[in-house]
Each structure stands twice: as structure tokens, then as C-alpha cells.
Image (cartoon, coloured by chain):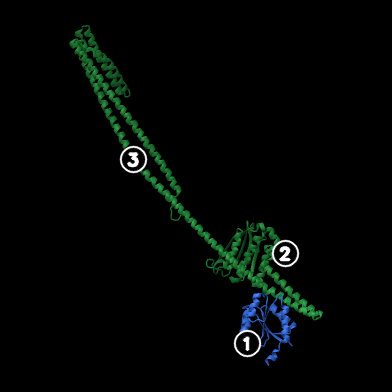
Chain colours: A blue, B green
Amino acid sequence: MPALKAFIVEDSPVILDNLVATLEELAQVEVVGAAAAEREALDWIKAPPAAYDLLIIDIFLKSGSGLGVLRAAQEAAVPARRVVLTNFANADIRRRCAELGADRVFDKSSELEDLIEYCSDLAGNAPSSAKALS
Amino acid sequence: MAAGHSTAGNGPQAVRRRAVFGLVIAGLMALLVWGASEWSYQRASGALTGLGERGSARLAMQLVLRRTLDAESAQRGYLITGRREYLLPLDEVRNDLDKALALLKRHYAADPATAALALRLEDRTLEKLSEVRETLAMYEVGDHDRWRELILTDIGREKMVETRAIVEQMMVIEDQRVAADRADIYRTLEFSRVGVHVSTLLALIGLLFFLRQTASMHAAQRAHADDLKAERDTLERQVRQRTLELSELNRHLQDVREAERSQIARSLHDNLGSLLTAAKLDMARLRRALAGGAAPADLERRLTHMVETIDQGIVFKRALIEELSPSALHNLGLRPALEILVSDLARRSGLQVTLACDDVMLGSAPRIVAFRVVETALNNVADHAGVKEAQVSVRQEAEDLMVVVRDAGQGFSPSEVPLSRYDLVNLRYRVETLGGTLRVTSAPGKGTEVEARIPLSASDWGELDSADREADAASARRRD
């Protein structure tokens, strides 16, 4: 049974589809929602139709920026983990993301395996959200 | 150019002509003055010489008369007293008379009437003298009755009277002539005086004329200088305007370039980026599958999925390259490239284009520019004209390629809307760099026509042709 519920903010449908398939196959993740733009993501976080344990955020979105989503999540003190998945993971971006409350930053080109491992670990250790809500 | 200056009367040419004219007049006047002066002098000195001669003639006449009287007196004295002393003057008489008569004859030789008078005088004088001689001879021989008789004949007295009369006549003539000569001199002087006055006046007029000419020439020179300055100012203005235009164009080009680059970046990120990430995700799954000992069928499926992903990447890459630089244009030529462009447009935007294109051999520079003209114009039609039809004509006319793109859409007003709005300024610049022209005709509601004339021999990449061929070869290798 998938232990980790994730919400993905990513504007490329190709990446989204592949990522969902990979995470569900390799990391016991269930993707409960996705958004392609900052506004969509913020609306969803404010009123999540489902509980979630992990936020996966891309920086470059169809409109707005993933940093805005991070900030909003930080301000709302969302209990879920927040990780950034991006093509441009240089030192500056990593620092900014850390300041905005990101737990980890993964480079799309070189740290995909790390992301999968991270999700696996999280899925293994995290209490089931069903248990948390009861 | 010389607005405000009448060039007809005061141009440097006209002024110079008038200056020459003035010089000629001055020369003629100088000649006139000199001539008049000379003539007056000649006439006056001639008249004075004449007067001198007349004086001599008068003296001569009076001498003749006196001498004749002397001879008569001598004769009478001797006849009355018988004393020889009375005859003394007679020797001189003959000499003087001869000289005086000769002078008179010379003096009056010119005029037959007066010459005749002189001869008569001579005759009378000689006759009188012979009468004197005869009477003296008679007295010498003692023939007193005869000489008394001779004297009583009054011949001597008559001769004397005639001589006197002739001399008086001559004197009158001389007086008249002297008066005439004097009048002549006065006239000459008068003429001279008038001449000098007139010359002075003419000289003054000439001077005024000259001064006016000089002023005219200066004015003309100033006007000329002003014209030059105005022209320079205009040119400077034009240069400033041109520079401004070029700066604008440059800025526009930079903007367009940046926009293009960020668009390409975006396109690469969105498409190629996603596909590569997807491929990496596939790899991660494949690796897990291998590590987990998955079945070959599963592996096969994973691999197939990856191959599809990579194929999509290749398709995108090809499309992007074609968009950037159509391979058909380089490899097949202008007409095939245009045909592909037209069919692409029909598919993408429903625009129906009628294409009439000559099969012309073109260098790479005019080929690309011609293609871009049609591409840009047709994109404008698709985006702004509001119609679904357009006509494209590419024909060879003499030494040029005529590219015409026409539509019957809503048009625009070129005086109100800058051509840069429709990417036409950049295009015009490229066409003009090849030595051609680009003309846009449009009016609201009346459609639009873009006409480019490109010299067939144009090649602004002349030295780079071999580099071009290299690039062509390289790009051909890139196309899988």
C-alpha cells in the first residue's frame, strides 16, 4: 500500500507523467494532485481536497514561480515535507529554497535517483496519513 | 536649395558677365576719350598752324602792297626830284616782292579761286613794276615827255588801285578764314569740354556700376555661402535622422534577437528538456528493473518507451532546426522552400496562398532574403490581415528578382503605424544591404502589398561563400 501521498507542481506534462509513473513504481508514492502554475498550486494548498505528506515543486512553471509556492507553504506552516525538483539547481537557488523552507533540492538532470531514494525512505518511515488523521 | 535668393539676376555667373561687360564699356570709353582728345588736339593745332600761316600771308600781302607803294614812291620821288637816292629802295623791292608773292602763291595754291587771285596780284604787281621801270628808263634816256605821258595814262595808278583792291580782297578772305579758323578752334574746345564732361559723367556712372557690381558679387557670394550652409545643415539633419533610424533599428534588432533567443531557450527547455528528463526517469526505472531481476518483457517495454522518448526528442530537434533555417532552402532552392512554407502555413493557419515562382538560380544571400520576405509577409497576413487568401509572385525581371506578396485584407496606414511593427524595417535593411529596394503599399481597407526588388547578382557574403559552403556541409551532417 502506497505510504507516501505527494502533490507535484510541474508544468511539463511529459515530465509529470513520467515522474508519476516512476515514483509510483519505484518509491511507493501515490500522487494525489498536480498543478502546472503557481496560482493553481496555491489554491490547492490552501484547501487541499486530500491529505498529503510531500510537496514536489518545480521552479519554472507555466506562470508564476515555484519559489512563490514554497513561500506560501512556509507561511501556512504546512506539515508536509517540501522538496524542489529543478533543472537549475545552482548554489544560489539551493540557498534560496532552503531559506524558503525546502527540505531538499534535487537537480532534474543528475539527482533523480536521489529523489527516488528520498521518497522511498520517506515512504518507509513516515506514519500512514490515514493513521495521522484518525 | 537657394530658397529666398533670386539666382537669375544675381548668381555668380550673371555678375561675372556684367563685370566683363562693364570692363568693355570702360575700355571703349577710354578709347573714346583718348580719341576725342587726340582729334581735338590735331584740329586745334592744325587750326593754330593755319592761323600762323594766315598771319604770314597777311604780312606778305601787306608787304607786297607796301613794297609796290615804295616802288611807286621811289619812282615818283625820282621823277620829281631827279635825285638817285630815291631809287635806293628799288633793289630790296624786287627781292621782297618775289619772296612775298611766292609765299602767297604757295599759301593760296590749294584753292583755285584764291590761287587765281594770287596770280592776278602777281601780274598787277609785275605790271606796276614794269611801268615803274619803263618810266625810269625813259627818264634815264631823257625821254621826259614819254614818261609823263605814260604816267598820265593812269595805268600806273590803275594798277596800283587794282593791286590795292586785290590785296583788300585777299585780306577780307583771310579775315574770313581766320574767323572760321577761330570758330573752329572754339568749336573744338567746346567739343573737348563737352567730351570731358560727358566722359566724367560716364566715368562716374561706370564707377557706380562697378561698385554695384562689386556689391552684387559680394551679395552673391554671401548668398552662395548661405546656400552651402543651409545644404550642410540639411545634410547634417539627414545624417542625424539616419543615425537615429539606424540606432532604432539596431535596438529593435537586439530586442528581436533577445526575444528569439529566449523563445528558443524556452522551446528547448519545454520540449527537449522534458524529453531528456523523461529519458532519465526511464533509465532509473530500467536500472531498478534490472537490479530487481525483472522479466525481459518488462525490460523490453521499458526500453521501447525510452526509444520512443528519444525519437520524440529527435522530431522536436528537427522541427526546431527547420524553423531556424529551412534545409530545403539550402539544399533544394527557393521555389521548393517556398512551396513547403506555403503548405505549412495552410496546415497551421488555414491560409491559402497562390504561389507563382520562377525557377531562378540565386546566390545564398539573395535566396535567404527573398525567402524571409515571403515568410515575414505571409506571417503578417496570417496574423493581421484578417483574410484567408494571399498571392505570392517571385519573378525574374531583367537583372533583378521581383518578390511580391499581396493580400486583400484590412491593410494598415504606413504613415501611422511604424513598419517595425510588422518586422518590415529589418527586412528592408537586409534587402537594401543587397542593393535592392523594399516597398510596402497599404491603406486601411485596401489590402497590403509588399514588393522587394533584389539584384540577382547580389551577394553580401561574397568572401564568405566558401565558409558558407562549409556551414552547409556541416548542417547537412547535423540533419540525421
The spot of residue B119 in percent (x, y) is 29, 19
Q: Position of residue A78 (x, y in %)?
A: 64, 86
Residue that badge 2 annotates? B476
Q: Which residue is mark 1?
A: A47
1 or 3: mark nearer the eye: 1
Q: Residue at the spot x=33%, y=38% of the render?
A: B196
Residue at far left of view: B80
| Quarter-of-image position of residue B72 | top left
Q: Which mark is residue B198?
A: 3
Using the numbered discs, state the Cα–Cα distance from disc 1 to disc 3 in whole angstroms.
121 Å
Q: Look at the numbered disc 1 and give the secondary structure of its residue.
A: loop
Front-most of residues B182 and B324: B324
Q: Position of residue A91 (x, y in %)?
A: 66, 75
Instruction: Confirm whether residue B34 shows in the render.
Output: yes
The span from disc 2 to disc 1 (Cα, nearest Å) is 55 Å
Which quadrant of the figure contains the C terminus of chain B?
Answer: bottom right
Q: Are marks 1 and 3 in contact (CB under 8 Å)?
A: no
